[in-house]
Image: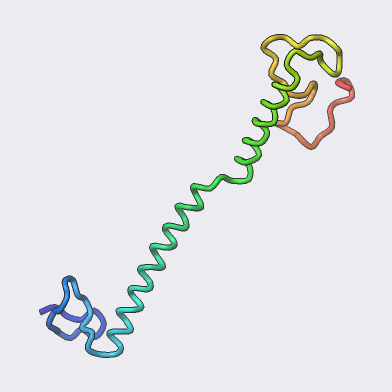
Amino acid sequence: MPRCKHCKEKFTVKYFLQKYCMEKDECIKAFTDSVAKDKEKEWQKEKKERKEALMSHSEWLKLLQSTFNTFIRMRDKGRECISCGCQPPRGARESAPGRCHGRRPYAPAPLSDR
């Protein structure tokens, strides 16, 4: 005969893997609390997995920047350069002359490039 997990008294098992005697109010309350705690743990684990699956702000910015650059390249294909008027080489992939979005996107272009 197993012992109750809460009151430590022996009891007869009525259900498979029963751990509480279910005869006293305290034991019933302890059982419901343990079930609620298990559900809370499962929810926290699921919430953590969902949060990790979401894209962060920086990942969204990278995706947006690459999509925008692709659009601009398609729009400007075959056109002249807006700063110097020459035809860009075939392998040129810069979306803006003299500026890149990588290191300091907030800083103005240097005076030599203007």
Residue 13 vs residue 35: left or right?
left
Q: Quadrant of residue 61?
A: top right
Give me the residue at 72% from left, 31% from top: 101
| Most foreground residue, 20 or 70 | 70
Q: Residue furthest left?
A: 1
**Location of residue 29 with respect to 91 vertically, above or below:** below
Percent position of residue 78, x then y: 75, 13
Number of numbered discs? 0
Q: Quadrant of residue 43?
A: bottom left
Give me the residue at 79% from left, 9% from top: 87
- Quarter holding the N terminus is bottom left
Q: Quadrant of residue 98?
A: top right
Give me the residue at 33% from left, 73% from top: 35
| Most foreground residue, 71 or 89 | 71
**Location of residue 103 with respect to 95 vertically, above or below:** below
- Quarter holding the C terminus is top right
Give me the residue at 67% from left, 26% from top: 70
Q: Residue furthest bottom?
A: 24
Percent position of residue 93, x then y: 69, 18
- How did the renderer colour the structure? rainbow
**Location of residue 53 with respect to 41 vertically, above or below:** above
Residue 68 vs residue 107: left or right?
left
Percent position of residue 29, x then y: 33, 84
Percent position of residue 31, x then y: 30, 79
